[in-house]
Image (cartoon, helix red, strand yellow):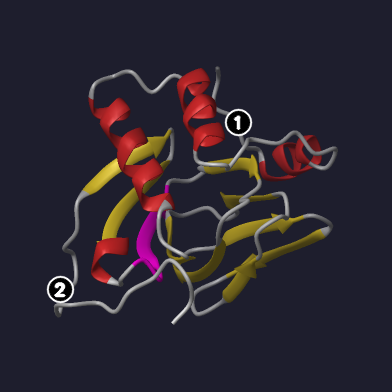
Amino acid sequence: MSAGTVAATTVKVVQPGEGRRGGLMPGVGVIFKIDGVDSGGALAVVEHPFEVGGLVPPHVHHREDEISIVLEGEIGFRSEDKEIVLGPGGYIVKPRGEVHAMWNAGPTPARMIEIISPAGLEELFRTVVGLTERGEAEMSKIVELANRYEVPIAEPEWFADVIQRYQLSMPTP
């Protein structure tokens, strides 16, 4: 076992369609499946639905790695100079320390599972969902929270090109 994790103590079952749902930003949601408390801190699992045009802006993780698995639709990923669009069954590892973004790259809604290791980032998502539910999810507040969780928003040179090619719109501050 790595430092900072302990053995899970109970079985947790999440049936299809279960999990608390909420909005992270326009066009991108989250469904909580497995939290850090369920895995002894080793990992968290969330599902992200993407509406057409949905976008997670470029950011960098300083604490965790992410593995994404596309379930439906087409999701584009850019991590540093690597870009790919994956369909159902596609996997991608986004290592900590690399600026990356994700977006719905197709003409229909899309969904993906995200495995986050170690756990903890799901608490940022939970906080943003709370802001969204209260109508307080201005981009400036999300940026401040992201910085607190060591996941700062980035502005890479390649981002404008991705926005143009996929006809996306950046959430406004």
Q: Main secondary structure of the magenta part?
A: strand
Is 126 or 74 nearer to us in this picture?
126
**Is 154 left, or right, of 168 in this rendering?**
right
The dot on residue 92 is: none
Q: Position of residue 94 (x, y in %)?
A: 64, 64
Helix, strand or loop under label 1: loop
Q: Position of residue 49 (x, y in %)?
A: 38, 53
Magenta range is 41-50
The dot on residue 169 is: 1
**Viewport quadrant of the C terminus:** top right
Q: What residue does disc 2 label?
A: 15
Compared with residue 30, is residue 7 higher up or lower down, i.e. above or below?
A: below
Q: Residue at x 39, y 38 (%)?
A: 24
Compared with residue 117, is residue 20 higher up or lower down, i.e. above or below?
A: above
Q: Residue at x 55, y 20 (%)?
A: 172
Q: Nearer the viewer, mark 1 or mark 2?
A: 2
**Is 151 left, or right, of 30 in this rendering?**
right
**Is 147 left, or right, of 100 in this rendering?**
left
Quarter holding residue 91: bottom right
**Viewport quadrant of the N terminus:** bottom left
